[in-house]
């Protein structure tokens, strides 16, 4: 028996949690999300106070994440805030801090 997929309604194949785990072998999805966010700032040649708006956050980062990364997306942002690499403005803007700039350049 294959426990990576399930058959629903005798014709629909559905990936199981074990199947997802096999496809996305990442040991640290949260760190990958944090790296993607900070890499966006680096590629944009950002400086202290530069902002990633909600549109960029969704289109450039979130929509490209795998399911495991999406599950820890909010936690990753919170860790970046706790580590003082970014701050949150107006509940949806990520603002790069001096410590954030120092970490990417």
Image (cartoon, rainbow, N blue to C red):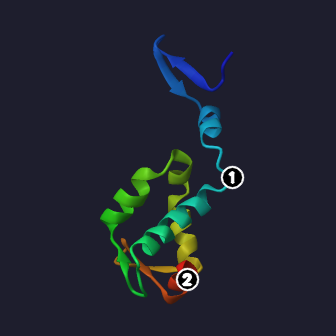
> At which x and y percent is residue 49?
39, 86
Task: Report the residue at 53% width, 61% height from top.
Answer: 33
Q: Quadrant of the N terminus?
A: top right
Residue marked by disc 1: 27
Judging from the image, what secondary structure is the residue with disc 2 in? loop
Q: Is residue 62 above or below residue 40?
A: above
Residue marked by disc 2: 84
> At which x and y percent is residue 46?
41, 80
Which label lies toward us, 2 or 1?
A: 1
Query: In the image as oriented, which residue stretches furthest toward the top?
Result: 10
Mark 2, Cα crowd under 10 Å, few <14 / some 14-19 / many 20+, is some
Sequence-first disc among 2 and 1:
1
Judging from the image, what secondary structure is the residue with disc 1 in? loop
Left or right placement of residue 54 versus residue 35 in this view? left
Count of number-bearing discs: 2
Task: Report the residue at 42% width, 85% height from top.
Answer: 47
Query: Which of 105 and 73 lies nearest the eye of the viewer?
Result: 105
Task: Report the residue at 58% width, 78% height from top.
Answer: 82
> At which x and y percent is residue 37?
48, 67
């Amino acid at each position: 028996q294959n426990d990576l997929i399930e058959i629903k309604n005798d014709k629909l194949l559905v990936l199981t949690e074990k199947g997802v785990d096999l496809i996305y072998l990442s040991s640290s999805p949260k760190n990958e999300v944090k790296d993607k966010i900070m890499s966006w700032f680096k590629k944009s040649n950002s400086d202290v106070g530069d902002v990633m708006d909600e549109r960029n956050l969704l289109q450039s980062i979130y929509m490209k994440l795998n399911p495991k990364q999406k599950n820890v997306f909010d936690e990753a942002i919170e860790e970046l805030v706790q580590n003082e690499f970014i701050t949150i403005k107006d509940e949806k803007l990520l603002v790069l801090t001096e410590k954030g700039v120092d970490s990417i350049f």
